[in-house]
Amino acid sequence: MTDRLSPDASTAVRALCKKISVAHHLDAEIQEELYDHMEDKLIAYLDGEEALTEEDALILVREHFGDPAAIKGLLQDVHAYEADVSLARRLAAALIATTGISVVCLCLASAVLLLWPPARGLTGFLAMYAATGVLSALVSWLLLWYWQRRLDTGHTPWFITRRPAYFVGSIVILLILQSFAPIPQPHISSAPAALARSADLSRLILIVTVVSPVLNCMAWLWWCDRPPRKVRAVAGAAGLWIIWMWLSSSVRDIRRIVLILYSSNATPWPPIAKGLGFSFLFLVIYALVAFAVYGMARHAAIGFMRWAGARR
Amino acid sequence: MNKELVGASTGLLVLGVLAKSASYGYEIVRSLNAEAEGVFLWQEGTLYPVLHKLEKAKLVRTQWQQADTGRRRKYYYITAEGREALAERTKEWNAFSQMVLRLGEMHND
């Protein structure tokens, strides 16, 4: 019969008992009693006096096998994501999600401006602006997170099974819808003057203008940054995001240029092209900012998980 | 078995075990699990709040002494008040279980 526990086991059991603290003047005796119980139990297991139930065996299997989340991460690092969802499908899904949400947000914002007169003022317009910008980015992120969760829990979201033609068709339809979606227009003539007077308003617009595309781009980066993690997948996602955002935001201007080129009207088109060039440049800057912020956030998250794991 | 049902009668069960002979924590759990014959399995850590509550109510008393294994253990002894409480609660439990059985049978008819 095992007489006493090894010093290591004894220390581990004592540490476990110490976690059960009741009151300073009572703890020593209570912990001694609990320690005795645990010692008896452990010795009985080692001696075979205590039979293992199915529940006990399950606990042992779980403990010996390791943390399922950690093992999942290790396995995902070994197996290519192509086995799960290809990068192309992920990108196509992100593209459809972002554009679809953007169209819906634009239509909703225009409907609110049309049906609710107070929203036509400068403050209301700014609220609309924030809603169509930051909110659509957050909703896109939420939708991508939901799809990832479905994938993680073994479901088969639609973008795994659909044929490429479906994606192409959906993207073309969404692009057309977006080019005709109403853009919220405030019924105020004094907006530029009001903005010039108020530094706060200008700052708010600047923040929303920068934060919403950065957030949106970060959602794409997160969505495409799947094990085995490759920089080129993330860079590809950022690249496609720039092109798509540029294309979808410029589709009206491009349509105008095409019309000008094929019409007898001699309206000059170079200023429009110049505007398109600037918007592309800004999108590249937003993507770079998103890339940097995402990289830092990911680094911090990994550091935190390691710290939490070490503590456990 | 329904946990609430077991939870409501833990004191009675422990007193029942101690009425047979004085015992310490680990041994009490083993006795209870043996008596239960798989009907329920006691979560061992939850025994001590019950034991300490019974001790505070003076239904049991304790004494540190050497167990058969040679190790020092805190033994729990049922007191006279404990025996009275056990008899009273057993009577209540009997009456209650008779009523449950009667109602159950009526329902089955």
Image (cartoon, coloured by chain):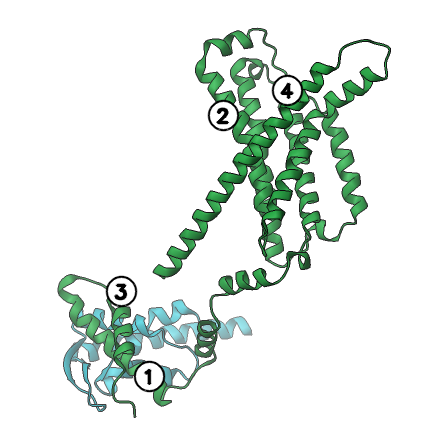
Q: Secondary structure at mark 2?
A: helix
Q: Quadrant of residue A16?
A: bottom left
Chain A shown in which color? green
Instruction: Tell me the residue that label 3 is attached to.
Output: A19
Choose between B103 and A192: the one closer to the eye.
Answer: A192
Residue assigned mark 1: B30
Rounded to the nearest angstrom, the CA distance separating label 4 from label 1 is 74 Å
3D distance between C-alphas at marks 1 and 2: 67 Å
The residue shown at (31%, 80%) is B29
Task: Say which amino acid is labelled 2.
Answer: Ile
Colour chosen for chain B: cyan
Q: Mark 3 Cα within 10 Å, few/some/many (few <14, many 20+)?
A: few
Which residue position holds label 4? A184
Q: Position of residue A8 (x, y in %)?
A: 28, 77
Residue to which mark 2 is pinned: A207
- Say yes or no: labels 2 and 3 on the same chain: yes
Q: CA distance from mark 2 to mark 3?
A: 48 Å
Q: In the figure, is residue A79 to the left or right of A253?
A: left
Outermost residue, bottom side: A1
